[in-house]
Image (cartoon, rainbow, N blue to C red):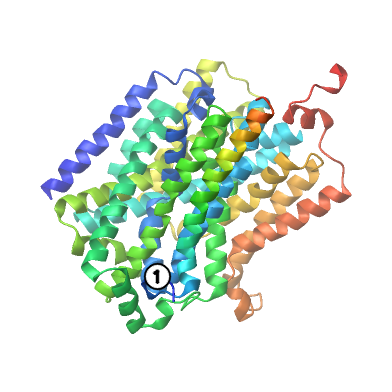
Amino acid sequence: MTVYVLVLVVYLGALAAVGVKMSGRSRSAGDFAIGGRQVGPWVTALSFVAAYYSSVVIIGGGAFGWRYGLATLWIGAGNVLLGTTLAWIVLGRRVRRMTGRLDAMTLPGFFAARYGSPQARLFSAAVTGLFLVVYNVSVLKGMANAFEVLMDLPYWAGVLISGVVILFYTAVGGYLAVVWTSMIQAIVMIAALLLLTFMSLQKVGGMAELVARLSAVDPGLVTTPGTWGWAGLVSFTLIVSLGTWGMPQLLVRFYSIRDDRMLRAGTVIVTVGASIALLPYLNGAVARVLVPTLDSADQAIPALTQLVLNDWGGALFLAGVVAAGMSTFAGVLIIIASSLVRDVWIEGLGRPLAPATELRASRLTSLAVGVVSLLIALKPPALVLVLTAFSWAVIASTNLWPLLFGIYWRRTSARATLASMVAGTTAALLWQAWPRLGWLPGLPPGLAGVHGFVVGTAVALVVILIGTLAGRPAPVACVRRAWGEPAAGDD
Amino acid sequence: MAPWNLPWTTFGAVLVVACSIVLAVVWALADKAHDRRSGR
């Protein structure tokens, strides 16, 4: 236990120190929200990995690997190819340039400037803000569960320890503190996962032995789609991979990176870093062989850690899980705070703030949102736990197509964008709630495993396509500004 | 059978990750060359 405490105190102290150091570099709301668009490739890329993979991915990914076997490696592969490499190639450069030209610091702010639609800004800010708070509660819960299992601490103590440290460095140091601490957290997370994988494969006798022993338990644990089936595997892979294309806490990395050269280097670094996505699933499958009897699949990774790692390794792994959660939580806090201050207060309600006041307001808002998330996480109501299951689906259904169409298709209609946001959100929510609504007929077995993300994004795509083809394009001035062309009168 | 006696359908996940790294490197080089040609 002493080793755990020692490692955590040093680790959490280092994160707090980074927050204090970065506080001097956050001099404006732009610095607080996006680091003044001056962040380098290593910090951007590794902080993207840390924000992408939360503690939910490590513990939950292990649970999937334990339950469904090696077919779940495809979830990790989807995270790397679709969620990371293609996201950087397809979105990175255009999002960086357009948000710069439109002077947008948030995703809702981008929608308002690109489409000339304050309604799109408010809708996106409201849905994203609400569901990111819900998502944050699940991340805090994941960290507290790790403290519970690995350090035998009460749940509330885990919530408080992780929450307070994050709130401190986020409110004090802003985006720069978040990305720098996230880079450290990514390194800790990668080291922890590599150590666990090396030790657990050694314990089981190597990869070929793992495959043989899994086959002996159930051949479906080795084949694809195996025991899970296509509907579940494909839709889950899509949501946790393509979903990133609409997640503001990840997209903000493209606003803040310094230039195109950095973006190219970042694309290679982020792809290599993101490759660790395979490891939680692989370790979950190893746990199925080494610890076949568990009360809950969520215990697979903690139980494997206790079996194959000594105290120092266990402490490093706990630090890795906490790191994964903290970086995600902190990234989300910055997004919600900037969005509430800029999109809702200043632009939405038309209450301008002086630059120094805006910075102070962003800091206080991040603190307030963090405290609210922390209080909810101490005793999450049943509704919040239900909503966490589809927070990604709803956020992605709202933002994904308006962003993608907005950066590639000049003609995209403002009204179609708003309609797509509303329809996508409604469809994702309705689909997820369907089994709980007794007055609706049951879904056919083939469709029951399809995630709300697939339905929400499909509906949103149809609406934005038809609406744009049938409706009027966004105002020319907005389009020309986004594409970096002189205004019509300047020709 | 693929390495470690895995079915190819499952080993494909590992190949996809390896191909993603190759894709990132090739794209970065091609993009750099494109920028140089267009004088950026």
Q: Secondary structure at mark 1?
A: helix
Q: Residue at x 48, y 72 (%)?
A: B8
Residue A70 visible within the image: yes
Residue highlighted by disc 1: B3
Q: Quadrant of residue A13?
A: top left
Determine which quarter of the picture holds residue A208: bottom left
Percent position (x, y) of residue A260? Answer: 58, 31
* Mark 1: few/some/many CA within 10 Å (<14, 14-19, 20+): few
> Which quarter of the figure is the C terminus of chain B placed in?
top right
Q: Is residue A291 visible?
A: no
Asked whether, in this view, residue A459 is left or right of residue A280, the answer is right
**Residue A400 shown left or right of residue A61 in the figure:** right
Chain containing the residue with disc 1: B
Q: Is residue A476 above or below residue A25?
A: below
Which residue is depicted at the point 86% across and 23% down? A488
- Spot occupied by residue A205 in the image (x, y as percentages of width and height): 24, 70
Towards the viewer: A46 or A335? A46
Q: Is residue B25 above or below residue A38?
A: below
